[in-house]
Image (cartoon, rainbow, N blue to C red):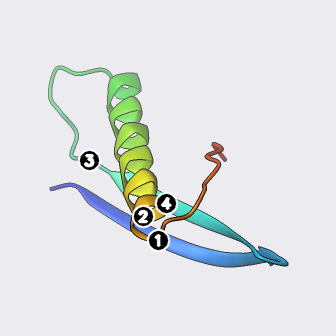
Amino acid sequence: MQTAGIKVNKAGEGRSNMVITATIPDTKGVSMELDKNREKELAVRIATSVCQAFNQDCQLSEQ
């Protein structure tokens, strides 16, 4: 099962930081690096959807 969490923090005047964590189940025979890439892809899709839903310009950065 895929899971994800979103946390939004105020980052100053008119700005917010959105932290997204996403996990996917381990896939047998697939490298750990590929699983991490899939988790990143899921997080990016979630961020894009949230930004579009609220009609906001978002800049994505990896932490």
Residue at which label 2 appears: 50
| 20 relative to 25, above or below | below
Q: Which amino acid does label 4 sit on?
A: Ile
Point 31% across, 21% down: residue: 31
**Residue where numbered disc 1 is placed:** 54
Residue 9 horizontal side relative to residue 14, left or right: left
For the residue pair 59 and 9, the one nearer the viewer reads as: 59
SS at badge 4: strand
Q: Where is residue 26 in the image (x, y as percent from the top left)?
A: 22, 39
Q: Do the residues labelled 1 and 2 touch (CB within 8 Å)?
A: yes
Q: Which mark is residue 29?
A: none
* Residue in the picture at 49% in, 66% down: 55
Q: Which amino acid does label 1 sit on?
A: Phe
The CA span between labels 4 and 2 is 11 Å
For discs 3 and 1, the disc positioned in front in the rendered view: 1
Q: Are marks 4 and 1 in contact (CB under 8 Å)?
A: no
Q: How far apart are labels 4 and 1 at the CA level?
A: 16 Å
Amino acid at the residue labelled 2: Val
Q: How far apart are marks 4 and 3 (CA)?
A: 13 Å
Nearest to the observer: residue 23 or residue 59: 59
3 and 1 marks in contact (CB < 8 Å): no
